[in-house]
Image (tube, rainbow, N blue to C red):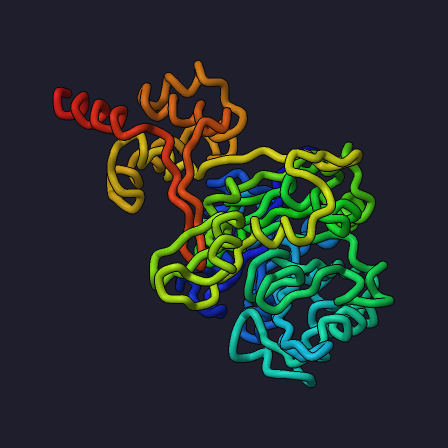
Amino acid sequence: MKFIADFHLHSKYSRATGKNTDLENIDKWAKIKGVKVITCGDFTHPIWFKNLEEKLIPAEPGLFQLKGSDSGVRFILTTEISCIYTKNGKVRKIHVLVFAPSLEVARELDKRLDAIGNIKSDGRPILGLDVKELLKIVLEVSPECLFVPAHCLTPWFSIFGSKSGFDSIEECFEEYSQYIYAIESGLSADPAMLWRIPDCRRLTILSNSDAHSVEKIGREANVFDTELSYSSIIKAIKEKNLKEFLYTIEFYPQEGKYFNDGDRICNISLDPKESMEYRELCPACGRKLVIGVLNRVQKLSDKDEGFVPENSIPFKSIVPLKTIISEALGVGEVSKKVKNEYDKLVEFYPEFDILLDVPIEKLKKIASEHLVEGIRRAREGEVNIQPGFDGVFGKVKIFSEVEKKEIIRQKKLL
């Protein structure tokens, strides 16, 4: 069975998340997006876990459905954990994604972690624990769990991050490196960037939304063709099976908020070559720049840009539908016009179908000429992006300024 899966999001019990990020809305928006398997997220949080026990009922093995829902959406158990500790004379801040095969396993893991640190204050708990020791605990609870370094190149909180990470999987996990089967790319990187890094070529690359609001579900995702079950999904990931793990769906990495090097306060964004010219110091204030993902890739890579390894899972890059609508209408993305147009379109097809699969001729029957052209350009990669830096998201441009003025002029005439 072919389906789309998103394994990383946060509930309303995590910091900086939408207050409507509950199971009902996750279920609703997964269907709107076209995501068949969605994580519940945050299963380590006691109140959220109680929600899961009360509202999720077993479906296929290791998967769940929302009680009383006919959406067809399935839930899988995952949670993100932050480890902050000192190793080899440096403070490390590593985020990981943990998959669990059952509520019983998740409950036992929560019990073990509750004895180590505070798992009640945040949906993504912070533990003063070496991430290798966390991996050992997870495997002791159940070898069926999957342990994945999250958003692997983000500067502040990742295994390869410029601020607090490592230079290799082995440096981080030592003799437990053999139990790392997959890695998450994060919004500021795509597989083409990770393929240049030796460790990432060995691993399966996952792409997930890391959504903090239900509207962001599926902004990155994974496409499988397996039996619908926890064990089949995990097996396809561990074995890097190209017949079962078909491709990932990616943000254009320049859209991510840590692609370039930069200084947000001074509004300085630099590519790695420019950063080197300034000795990685802000040319405006002299502070150390936040080194972005592109720079970090270049420092860790042993292959040139464009290298494609054998047995690599392909990917497709997308621009979110609301962004395309905003460009086509010449109005802000949070405007009522964009919402109304979006709501109209997803009555016909899920968002992913519109972005990836529905033939252009069919789209012309339900959308304006400019919107259909925007979707076509996004599919073909005909976009311009001002790269993100130091926590600032990149800005996508599908239409030129001249084209935008013409769109506005035509709308006024109409």
Q: Horizontal and vertical percent for residue 357? A: 54, 25
Q: Is residue 114 visible?
A: yes
The residue at 76%/60% (across/down) is 169
- The image quarter in which residue 120 lies: bottom right
Residue 216 position in % (x across, y down): 46, 49
Point 53% across, 38% down: residue: 34
Residue sitting at x 82%, y 61%: 177
Is residue 165 found left or right of 371 in the rendered image?
A: right
Task: Tell me the quarter of the picture where residue 159 sits.
Answer: bottom right
52 to 186, vertically: above or below:
below
Quarter holding the C terminus is top left
Q: Position of residue 401 (x, y in %)?
A: 27, 30
Quadrant in the rendering for residue 386: top left
Q: Is residue 158 above or below residue 367?
A: below
* Number of numbered discs visible in the structure rendering: 0
Residue drawn at x 75%, y 67% is 172
Q: Nearer the viewer, residue 113 or 194?
A: 194
- State the residue lying farthest toward the bottom: 115
Residue 215 visible in the displayed image: no
Question: How far across and how far down the image is residue 330, in percent?
Answer: 25, 34
The answer to whether residue 233 is above or below residue 84 is above
Farthest-out residue, left: 413
Image quadrant in which the N terminus is located:
top right
Foreground residue among 303 and 125: 303
Q: Is residue 101 above or below residue 404?
A: below
Q: Is residue 42 left or right of residue 385?
A: right
The residue furthest top is: 361
